[in-house]
């Protein structure tokens, strides 16, 4: 099919008068379009495409997008299918279809060799994209994701499913959910908390429900369980930046360090940077610092 950008009348303005955010929808499959936001930069600067994680949305990337745009880069962020304000078809979820959606978006927007950055599950998506389309990719950024093999963390699919099935929050009001997020992640700035709340809609009864339905969520978890990033890193030819978060969980950090070492031993060009202490959503916790890392990787020629 032919992919294209669907017209949208919406445009919102960032914190500076010079920054405008163009909102549109990109048709990625018959009857399926994604919500996309674009900040235009200098024609000669490397473009960035930002991909969120499982059950998240593009709002978590806002701070990074603003900083990169302020440095002259064109920046595109998208809501993956079933997430945010994108369409939610009944089936077809997981790594493979997410990669196809990403490619359709990049093609429709006419982006030439972007740096593709993904957080958490988004890291898996951009890693797979770069392996499949290396000539179309300037660089890869995996933000606390893309390197972990769930088979290293759980002895069976059943154990993985039990651990990664999200908690039921549909008994909460929006105010109660916000209080819960603030209590669990007091380090997050207000704008990141507001972005996290956008992962939910409010029903007529005043209670919340996740935008990503549970059965779709678990389809993606299954896809993650079946993926083997270690094998993909052996095929990777695109420069890759790993941005990792030490959350204070020693066992998790040790597993991440093992995966980091495995990735560096497998691929030709991998560099890494740790934030410590930091949350899994480090891109929304420290957007200025994450954006600086990404921009510096272009400036110093790593993403050439």
Image: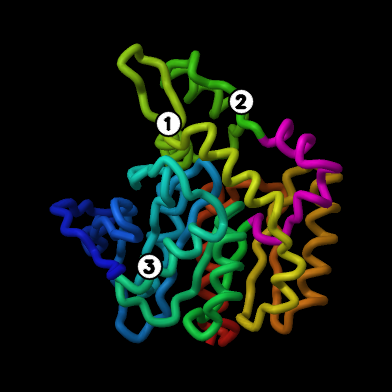
Q: Could you tell me which residue is drawn at 34 percent across and 58 percent down?
A: 29
Where disc 2 sits, the SS reads loop
Q: In this view, does 237 lie above or below 257?
A: below
The numbered mark, 3 or 1, whose residue comes first in the sequence reads 3
Where disc 3 sits, the SS reads helix
Q: How far apart are marks 2 and 1 (CA)?
A: 13 Å
Q: Could you tell me which residue is drawn at 35 percent across and 14 percent down?
A: 206
Range of magenta residues: 144-164
Q: Could you tell me residue 134's position as x and y percent?
A: 55, 81
Q: Dividing the picture into quarters, in which one does residue 211 lie?
A: top left
Residue occupied by mark 1: 200
Q: Could you tell me which residue is drawn at 51 percent across and 81 percent down?
A: 138
Numbered badge on residue 104: 3
Dot in front, 3 or 1? 3
Residue nearest the observer in this picture, 30 or 184: 30
Is residue 11 visible in the rendered image? The answer is: yes
Residue nearest the observer in this picture, 14 or 59: 59
Q: Distance between the residues labelled 3 and 1?
A: 26 Å
The numbered mark, 2 or 1, whose residue comes first in the sequence reads 2
Q: In this view, does 160 lie to the left or right of 91?
A: right
Where disc 1 sits, the SS reads strand
Residue occupied by mark 2: 167
Pointers 3 and 1 in contact (C-beta within 8 Å)? no
Numbered badge on residue 37: none
């Amino acid at each position: 099919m032919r992919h294209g950008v669907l017209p949208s009348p919406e445009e919102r303005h960032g914190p500076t008068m010079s920054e405008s955010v163009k909102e549109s929808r990109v048709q990625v499959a018959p009857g399926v379009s994604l919500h996309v936001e674009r900040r235009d930069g200098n024609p000669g600067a490397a473009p960035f495409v930002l991909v969120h994680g499982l059950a998240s949305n593009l709002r978590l990337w806002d701070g990074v997008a603003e900083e990169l745009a302020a440095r002259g880069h064109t920046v595109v962020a998208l809501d993956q299918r079933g997430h945010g304000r994108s369409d939610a078809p009944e089936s077809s979820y997981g790594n493979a279809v997410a990669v196809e959606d990403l490619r359709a978006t990049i093609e429709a927007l006419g982006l030439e060799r972007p740096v593709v950055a993904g957080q958490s599950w988004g890291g898996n998506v951009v890693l797979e994209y770069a392996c499949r389309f290396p000539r179309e990719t300037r660089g890869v950024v995996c933000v606390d994701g893309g390197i972990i093999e769930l088979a290293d963390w759980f002895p069976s699919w059943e154990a993985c499913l039990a651990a990664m099935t999200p908690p039921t929050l549909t008994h909460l009001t929006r105010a109660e959910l916000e209080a819960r997020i603030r209590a669990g992640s007091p380090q997050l700035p207000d704008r990141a908390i507001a972005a996290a709340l956008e992962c939910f809609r409010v029903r007529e009864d005043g209670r919340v429900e996740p935008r990503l339905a549970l059965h779709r969520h678990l389809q993606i978890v299954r896809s993650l369980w079946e993926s083997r990033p270690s094998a993909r890193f052996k095929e990777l030819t695109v420069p890759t930046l790993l941005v990792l978060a030490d959350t204070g969980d020693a066992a998790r950090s040790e597993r991440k360090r093992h995966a980091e070492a495995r990735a560096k031993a497998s691929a030709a060009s991998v560099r890494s940077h740790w934030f410590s202490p930091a949350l899994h959503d480090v891109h929304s916790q420290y957007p200025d610092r994450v954006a600086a890392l990404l921009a510096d990787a272009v400036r110093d020629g790593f993403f050439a």
